[in-house]
Amino acid sequence: MNGQIHFTLNGEKVTSDRHANERLLDVLREDFKLTGVKCGCKEGECGACSVLLNGVLANSCMVAMGSIEGSEVVTIEGYSKTKRFQALSDAYAQTSAVQCGFCIPGMVLACEALLAKNPNPTDAEIRKGISGNLCRCTGYNAIVEAVKIAAREGKGLW
Amino acid sequence: MVTFSNGYLVDNLADALKIRSEIDVTPYAGGTDLMVDAKEDAVYLFLNKIPELRRIYSDEQYLHIGAACTYTEIFENSLSPQILKDAIDYLAAPAIRNMGTAGGNICNASPKADTALIFYVADAKLRICNTSGERILPIEDFYVGRGKTVLQKDELLVEILVPKQGLEHYYYKKVGARQALAISRVAFAGIFTTENGIITRCAMAFGSVADTVLRFRDLEALFVGKSIAEAKSLRSQFIANYEQAIVPIRGRVSAEYRKSVCMNLLEDFLTQNGI
Amino acid sequence: MESISKSIPKRDHFPKISGSAKYVDDLSFEGMLHGKIVRSTVACADIKEILIPDLPEGYFVIDKNDIPGINSVHIVDDDTPVFSDGTVNYVGEPILMVAGKDLKVVNRLMKLIKVVYDEKEPVLDMMKSETIFYQYGYTKGDWETAFREADKIIEEDFQTGYQEHTYMEVQGMIGFYENGKSIVRGSMQCPYYVHTAVKRAMGLESDKVQVIQEEMGGAFGGKEDYPSILGCQVAVAAYKTGKPVKVVFDRSEDIICSPKRHPAKMHYRAAIKNGKITGIDADIVYNCGAYTTLSPVVLQRGLICATGVYNFKNLRVRGKGVKTNTVPNGAFRGFGGPQTFFAIEMFMDHLAKEIGMDSLSLKESMVVKQGDDSATSGKYHFHIPFPEMIEKLDQMSDFRKKREAFRNQTGRYRSGIGLSLVYHGCGFTGSGERDLIKGVVKIVKNTDDTVELLTAGTDMGQGLKTAFAKIASDTLEIPLERIIVRNPDTDRVPNSGPTAASRSLMVVGKLLQRAAEKLKQDWKPGEYQEFVEKYVHPDFMIPWDLSKFQGDPYPDYSWSANAVEVKVDTLTATTEIVGAWGVYDVGTPIDMAIIKGQMQGGFLQAIGYGSMELLDVNDKGVIRNNSFSDYIIPTSMDVPHLETEVVENTYENGPFGGKGAGELPAVGGAPAYVEAMENALGVNLHHTPFSQEDTMKVLEAFKK
């Protein structure tokens, strides 16, 4: 008997009938219509597909469905309902860090993962935290500035 | 145990070994190598929920690292030696480090494997199990060629055993194309130990330059048992031996480049240690 | 700072950051099929036969035989086919499309299709090409005498490589055919380019083709002409199948088959007399690839820039764009300028050494000023702020002091600092604005007194929507929230021209400003009003003559000074980029944060072009490094210290004083980086990207 895959997605318990060897990225986009999770390369090199898997940053293109049985997945759609997101979004708006936007959902989750572990990061720590998220538009400066602003102004959030 | 289409999820080692012995499966720990060129008909044995494979603990002689420990877990564990942390720190990027595992790194059998290089120079052993029992072998004996290991179809890599002593005095340098998300182009790791002025260990390993990680114990032996002064007098011979032994292959960078970097780092390692 | 320069939150900020913005691959339509293109695996061949397996119900093959109009994509010339006409001229050339409901099945079918080639010898080396697509040349003064009377003639060869855009969102397009009308939606910079091309391929009139731009995940020029090809392909596929057809590339496919920056080989000569440069002679070759696409204009711009920012009285510039059996090259931020600017900046550094001068001093003594004649016998009509920019750059980077300090280094680490001075001509090259584009905009005031701006301008992240809204809001003096700017739809917007050539702010923005001024004068509350504004060619310009290659190819230029500092580890030949500084003149910044974003992003791309972005075609014409792990672009950790500043130099003919900004920052980074490497290594260098291996070769040569 081939089982369904059970996991929690943006706070809700869900199931998938997909094969265990299929990519989480494809399942999120195609079955759950969570198109905020982007596909940039399908080889784990760009981070556009980043999600939070059991609280840690993961490239959903590199995750096979069978490995997430019983796990918690958070995408930008779920994260965007949080106060932490609001702080990051306000900060990104201040520095106009969103250009084409394609890297941004993944980038925001990378920022969350970074701040959750390190609420007052240095420039170097920020750059390291987002080092797996490629951006071709911004040159990264505005994003780094935004994280500093969010850390400073998001008092007590992280 | 859960059976999926194209996958098995187990929560203990015994069940994992049983499946391994009965069904043609691909062991899956973190997925960060397997999923790059994922085959449509792949059948995975998911190992990421097996506690025996996710432990890091220490006994008198060895640090035991479960094969399915992620790079991040190893990095954040206070038991992990700094040389290993350094290698992990420069490996890929945070998301890959959160999912990728040491066992996957070893079994993927790429000569570029960042942690395999460290395990080579640290004289690590691998504990490999099947339903009949287990075997423990030095990591050098695990590889038989490019992308080829001695892992049998019914076996699983369970643990990496890293001898604890003498890992503090090390040299590590990785050359990649950029500061992050960089596949290793040349990598060098060295461990140097003296006791009462006598060299007891001069271990050196070279990654990404040949079909497997390179280590030449027989050449290292030239220095073992010698004083620093004696070793210094043998420096040219030592270097000449390595000059001959290291024959890099061309990859994304030329063999000449790789050779130059290997020899430069080797010489610097010696110089740093007073030789 | 002008009040318009004050930054505001961007219009598209929230949809993009919340993940709700829809890019083309996020869209689905009822009955939609997925298409994948079968591409040539050889560089030059006739196709003898194509073996296609039996297709399951609902799966189609679309090829040249299904094209209702002409099998040709109009770009500048018409030689690019929609689908192969029976020959293939580069690896990756589209042969046919497979379309069907399930992408997995489409992929399986593709693997079963066998193309039988009759292979021919490909031409891969641009210097061995016998097909010249385009050729231009010009002179100024008396270069022949200058060279005849020279004390010394210095000759050097320079080389620049490919650059791949790596926009984070790959190329993608959806085609529809409904009631005799072709509709194309997708990621594109120029909806009207796609419109013209689809009309031709489908054999339809203007009102029977509709092109809609979807949210774009980056472009940088890579989606300037290519969408015309993909647009025709999906339009034909939708026509044949009767269903919507979506084609979205894989990343490796995108790297293999989409346009790149033209590789170039450039031969420069300088005549030196009495320690002064009396003449310059440049001979330029650009590798166009297999079809012409945008090459004529890229080459023109490259040749215009060939003598850089310097006031040479006697010069000759010749250039040609040649065919090779490689991917057709196209637009990439800078559009032909970065190549020749690389050459002239490196050449000037070397000439300074010959003459015995410090490189910056030589450059400073020769930079152009307002009123000087340009290389093509036009004029620099407006102020050129080099003195201010160089001073500012020196303050930011400490260039002069470091340059001195970095002489005669020993030790494991070698530091170096390099500098470049460049420009970018604003607007479409030559007489294009006046003769080809003839841009038109429309402003509509609705009865609820909201105002919609109708242009063909596309926002690819550069902030076009926000900038246009600000221009209108400030002119009309109504709140920003009352200004509507949508992604263009050719059914609704006039043709204001392509989103390219750094023309959107300066040209289209100016038209919007004029239209808004007219609306303001004649504002009728509660009434529907329309204002149309057409391009007016500036009358101060000396007319451009392409056949003579003389005149003003641009109304004005944006200027930049860049410095890059490096630290080379001589053991590993790896380079740490310690600092990067850029000063830019873009007229009045329409929004400071948006401009900064353009400066910083472009500068980092240029540094990539100088250092790590190697792309190679092997001896079979194949691009081997066709993945993100293999084509290396900068991460957040590669240039941690990158600073940009603007100098304000208002351009009266631009909206609120603004001029072209988007491409300028991509022009000067590479020569600044490579000059820094020269400074660190103590040798003259001649090519970009200058890699780790190149560095090791220099270091090893020193050892011997």
Image: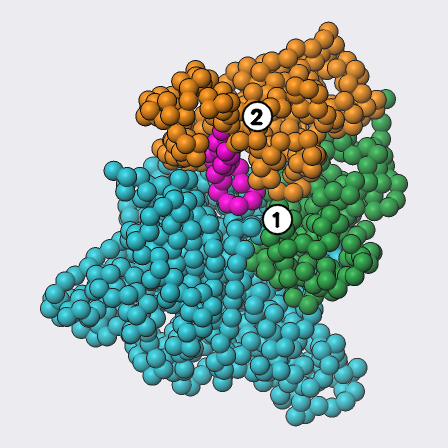
Q: Label 1: how many residues lie within 10 Å, few (<14), some (14-19) or many (20+)?
A: many
The vertical placement of B147 against C362, above or below, is above
Rendered green, the chain in question is A
Q: Answer with the quarter of the image where residue B118 lies.
A: top right
Position of residue C22 measured from the top left corner of the image (x, y, whole percent)? 71, 56
Q: Residue furthest top?
A: B132
Q: Residue at x 42, y 66 (%)?
A: C398
Residue pointed to by mark 2: B166
Residue pointed to by mark 1: A128
Chain C: what color? cyan
B264 within the magenta span: no
Q: Residue at x 25, y 64 (%)?
A: C352
Q: Secondary structure at mark 2?
A: loop
Rendered orange, the chain in question is B
Q: CA distance from mark 2 to mark 1?
A: 30 Å
- Left or right of A72, for residue C425: left
Position of residue C103 measured from the top left corner of the image (x, y, whole percent)? 68, 38
Q: Secondary structure at mark 1?
A: helix
Q: Which residues are magenta?
A: B171-190
Q: Residue at x 34, y 83 (%)?
A: C371
Is residue C128 in sight in this rendering? yes
Which one is in front, A69 or B97? B97
Q: Residue at x 81, y 37 (%)?
A: A71
Is residue A102 in sight in this rendering? no
B182 within the magenta span: yes
